[in-house]
Image (cartoon, rainbow, N blue to C red):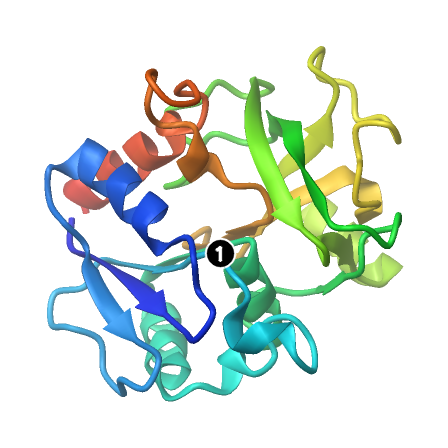
Amino acid sequence: MQAGIVLFPGTNRERDMALALQRVTGRKPAMLWHRDTDLPAGTDLVILPGGFSYGDYLRCGAMAAQSPIMRAIRDFAAGGGHVLGVCNGFQMLVEAGLLPGALLRNASLRFLSMDCHLRVERTDTPYTRHFQRGAVFRSTMAHGDGNYFADEATLDRLEGENLVALRYVTPAGEPTAAANRNGSARNIAGVLSPNLRVMGLMPHPENQVDPLIDGTDGLPLFESLAEALAAA
């Protein structure tokens, strides 16, 4: 698997993501700069990591979505490439039109930095095949604008087409209001593109890939990617 991680001014989670990928593939991913206009030949996966691109001015991810490399990423996704956006990367994906919806200010109007629990809604995707459907895993949220919003028609379409990848839940798997710390519509934490190759999520599964640091709850996501792309 040849992965590339895109760096923008203000990105700060690229090393965590690189370590997660290297753990499952044994290979260092390429670090790509936002001013690049092409992806390296043979790229299988592009990751837009977390951080505060351009200082989160205007809207989170809005300026990054206009960076030169995003045209190449749009073309890559249109051709069936795999793209993962985490936190600020998810914000970029919706701003770039690669995923529907928007990420608004947290319902509390406060930055949230804490653990959360996520329920896996489907397992037939390149990102979730190493989970069991309905499995609950712990992850970390660290954002001020993670409140997923879409109009009712879009939310109904996401539900009807089974494109909700992850939901905020209690440790027992219940999608309660209390578990939904940022106020996201229908407890949505992550969504998929119709071809299942683009995924965005707000929490940071790359935080949980090492038993000596913070557990391995997030490791199945990266193992899923490695297996899916090796098979492809």
Q: Is residue 81 above or below residue 192?
A: below
The residue that disc 1 covers is: 50
Between 202 and 224, the one lying in front of the other is: 202
Circle 1 sits in a helix, a strand or a loop, which is it? loop
Q: Going by the image, does 78 lie left or right of 150?
A: left
Between 204 and 12, the one lying in front of the other is: 12
Point 77% across, 39% down: residue: 187
Question: Splitting the image into 4 quarters, where does residue 197 fall?
Answer: bottom left
| Residue 198: percent from left, percent from top | 45, 57
Most extreme residue toward the top is: 172
Q: Going by the image, does 63 lie left or right of 24?
A: right
| Residue 56 seen by the camera | yes
Q: Is residue 134 above or below residue 74?
A: above
| Residue 203: percent from left, percent from top | 58, 42
Q: Is residue 21 above or below residue 69?
A: above
The three-letter code of the residue at mark 1 reads Gly
Point 50% across, 87% down: residue: 66
| Residue 165 seen by the camera | no
Q: Residues within 10 Å of mark 1 (few under 14, many from 20)?
A: many
Point 66% across, 29% down: residue: 116
